[in-house]
Amino acid sequence: MARPICIAITAMGGQGGGVLADWIVSLAEAGGWVAQSTSVPGVAQRTGATIYYVEIIQVPSGVFPVLALMPVPGDVDVVIAAELMEAGRAMQRGLVSPDRTVLIASTHRSLAMVEKIKPGDGVADSGPVLAAAAGLSRRFLAADMQAVAERAGSVISAALFGALCASGALPFGRAAFEAAIRDAGVGVGGSLAAFAGGYDAVLAPVQEVARPVAGAVGVAGPAGEQAAFSAAMRRVAAEFPSAAQEMLGHGLRRAADYQDAAYGHEYLDVVARFAALDGAENGFALTVEAARQVAVAMAYDDPIRVADLKTRASRAARVRGEVQAGADQVVETTEFMHPRVQELVATMPAWLGAALERSGLATRVLRAVFERPRRVRTATVWGFLQLWLVARLRPRRRGLLRHGREMAHMAVWLGAVERQVGRDYRLAIEMLACRRLVKGYSDTHARGAGKFDRVMAAVALVEGRADAADWVRRLRDAALADEDGTMLDGAIATVRTLEHPAHA
Amino acid sequence: MAERSFAREVQDLRLGAGDVFRGEGILAVTKALLQSGVGYVAGYQGAPISHLMDVLSDAQGILGELRVHFESSASEAAAASTLAASVNYPIRGAVTWKSTAGTNVASDALSNLASGGVLGGALIVIGEDYGEGSSIMQERTHAFAMKSQIWLLDPRPNLPSIVAAVEHGFALSEASNTPVMLQLRIRACHVHGSFAAKDNREPGFSLAQALENPVRDPQRIVLPPASYVHEQEKVRSRWPNAVRYIREHGLNETFEGDVAEVGIITQGGMYNGVIRALQGLGLADVWGATRIPLHVLNVTYPLVDEELVGFCAGKRAVLMVEEGQPEFLEQALNTVLRRADVATRIAGKDFLPMAGEYTAQVLGDGIAGFLGRYAPEVTLAAAPDARPVLAGALAQALAQTVPARPPSFCTGCPERPIFAAMKLVQQELGPHHITGDIGCHLFALNEPFNIGSSTMGYGLGSSSAAAFQVPAGKRALSVMGDGGFWHNGLVNGVGNAVYNKHDSVTVIVDNHYSAATGGQDLLSSRAEPKGRSTNHPIEAAVRGVGATWVRRVDRTYDVARMRDVLREALTTRDAGPKFIIASSECMLNRQRRERPIFAAAVKRGKRVVKPRFGVDEDVCTGDHACIRLSGCPSLSTKPSGDPLKPDPVVAIDNSCVGCGNCGEVAEAAVLCPSFYRADIVHNPGRVERVVAGVRQRVIGWLQAWRAARVLAVG
């Protein structure tokens, strides 16, 4: 019995799903078919998930088809998803069926708000979507169509139209597809290039080029420093278990790049304390975690580091690449800074900073004259020089107020971890991992440090339990789930209701 | 200027006899109006009928040739009142809006219009915003039709049927002296199809003729005793005349089928869904041939008793397919058959759900249940059913991972910084009771802002705080858009607050357009569209009704100033209502306006600057505080690429329009120094190149100096 070819397009508002639907209609009509398309523009077009639906059918003369205005679950021939999670949503709606549906999806991710706002990693797992797409469709064609479109200087709808052509799901040749793009007459050149890219991408998927791992180490600086750094690298190979060497390499590079080669050696000395407590029976997991977290703690984020990073030659090149500036264009960068008195004082020699902090008057005066938003134009000599001078404080960092405090804080934390290793190895690792909570600048940093302190304090509540490590991990996850720590409060309240082994 | 240009579609309005019109349902309505000799058209934009307004707005030339007056009304009430021109004169008029939201606003005028009746055909094109994709409360226009006695057309959702409904709608209105509503569901408004065009017709009697030869008839005015007479006229003459017209012109359709002992009665708008459901059960084909007899109500009010009795008589049972609730049609059908003493069983909401959209799957289940009970001898095919697949592990796992994606503010939206500032001020002063309004700003309800406790209607944000005018430690805060302000808010919000000496704070979001409905112009728009008077400042209107505490923020992206003004309004000792007018142009429209100009300038070799924002990924620590205060779509996260940093870092993609909000937020909230602005200078001048070169040399020297002195490990 005659039936239409049913095509659903799931997209986000602004992705050009309507253009794609229009091309399909024009393709079918040019081929003498009858086409009907519908959509729900409305507010959904404001970046929300939306759906376009097309039915096309070959019609004998004298009759008119009765076509549906929305996709029927279990009865869709082609589903085109303009983003990976929208492919997931199409499957959740039942639009993809194993006996019928060709699923064409772009594998790129455009993160939803709920994925982006978490203080930790809120990005949804693509695995279940890819598994379902492969398992629930008759045929699954996928590629990063966003990248294809960007390479062609066009939009994703054109790349997806190419993929639809390549799928062979519609009884029209490539020339007819391309004619539909030409007939629409908007951005034809770019669209045809993206079309070709999409066509090729699903037929011969290009292997994703893996991000180059920072394996090749570029070392620059005074010869003495370079030699000392090389010596430190040799220490990694000679003094540490091989399981931890990769992470130690990352950590060492960070510490040396942050301060100097001697700082790198100090870093190794600290991690060595944990390696001494560790053993092969645990796969040196404690040493690996210490290698990671000690580096993070030693390379704390301060104004000197920010100024250092923002004034390097490599940075200017990266900015030009990110904003896609051409060689004949001038790029002027402006930095958004808001240094507070706290940061100013912390960047002073310990004795001076501490004295100023104690004086309420001095703080008030400094606040009045110093604290204001500063937009530093780093493309100008004067703007650059300001940051460059801050970065020049780097060799003196060890004597500054902030450094003393960071080191004291680290000593307390690492001491607690060391005491824990013999009692509960897994708990010790989780305590190390909690350093992840301290991040950001200003209030964000204070909030993160506060969460870190609360979780560390809660360790006492679970110590001695067999599942103590699991509880600390849960507390950490809760702390990363929201900004104000509501989840963490709840989790700590739960921990308080646990029966303490001492009373059991 | 609306968000979308209809320059091409406007040309289709000129098609005549022998041409085929191809396009969207709502544009077919527009063409049908011109074919029907309409004299005037008015309306208020809103999905799904915005395109009708937008295309007419772009079609001034054709309308002028045909002597058709077109107005973008200030509200649906104003649009409905426009139909007064058809009360005394034989002029056809059409108005349009989104329903039921707009019908609520229009009801005063509609009741008066329906009471006195009309001489010229009066057609109300209703975009029935119900079901998936709807942005309003789920109600039925049917209730309005019944209470005011306005006829309701619900044609089959294909272009020829929709066009016929427009043409018959005018004639029915004239035959029965009653206004007629033409109801189109969201997808019917946007359905692409074709129909055979006819020539456009000039109105036979013009508005100018009416003005020059005025007629009055006190009997048409709602004032006792005429109003009592109107009610009698409604039931004694207008109703029977309407029924006669519907029968004589065969507006409702019956499709025979061989399973004659049962039947389905359906709203016209549900017809395609019913056929698709029957196809799934093996009882119909794609050409509309059906085994189950169908009676299609292209007119759902009034019902034609004789037709219904004729269809039902001799059948064991009929199924009433009626989307939405309450089940007015099913109740009426019961009365009709009972009065005619027809014993046919009536099924409806017992097999179909009482509430919610009737998708093909819902209809298929309902029809299968109905036939199973009343025609068990009919063999049913296994309809397509996704449920077994959805119950499987692969599909179930999706629920854990696929994130919700509600609509939100666009990239660069100037409203976002207003809500960022509200978030910041609440961090200082504690949470406040905040009333919302209708418009894009309602998206603040969702993440990352979570702002707004109620929304009572268009322009009613301020008056929704009316009860909270008592001494307390905090003030109520209201939001209102410029669309809502001119629709209703000036009087019911500002005037009400001034007169009653409110103490609360109202933020009026002035983005230069009625943005949520598609960027149409307003009284306060900065553009100067032909044939409209604009550039009337909101501030003058607010002060004009007596407000004295008024602050303007002319660049909403200045988050710090926005926060400071909010703080001042919430804490000032001054009595009386406080108004903050926050102005910046809707970015969607601004981009549409500026992008072609910019591209042309680049091409011409002119020096132009394009700002873009970026994040230094090695400075970003992955806390995402900036996203929680900004929520810009172009502000996202990416894997850090740094094994020491497990959380993703923030990244700005190339959709960034350089509005500056993220930098301002980072500054105002003292977040972090990761953000930078890169001003990309296209076609820089020679002096500029030289200066840039010199700067680069000095900077390069400074970099080299340091590189020789400190260790760098990359």
Image: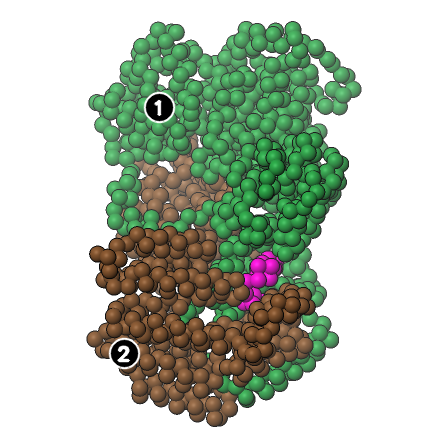
Chain colours: A brown, B green
Q: CA distance from mark 2 to mark 1?
A: 72 Å
**Which of the 4 image quadrants contains residue B65?**
top right
Q: Residue at x 30, y 80 (%)?
A: A275
Q: Amino acid at mark 2?
A: Leu
* Viewer-side residue, A103 vs A420: A420
Q: Nearer the viewer, mark 2 or mark 1?
A: 2
Same chain, labels 2 and 1: no
- Name the residue that disc number 1 marks: B349
Location of residue A43 with respect to B350 vertically, above or below: below
The chain to which mark 2 is attached is A
- Name the residue that disc number 2 marks: A277
Identify the element where label 2 is drawn: helix
Residue B133 in the image: x percent, y percent? 47, 39
**Which of the 4 image quadrants contains residue B670?**
bottom right
Queried whether the magenta region covers residue A477, the answer comes back as no
Q: Quadrant of the N terminus of chain A?
A: top left
Can residue B471 be seen in this snapshot?
Answer: yes
Magenta region: which residues?
Answer: B659-676
Q: Quadrant of the C terminus of chain A?
A: bottom left
Residue density around tag 2, few if under 14, some if 14–19, many if 20 or more, within 10 Å: some
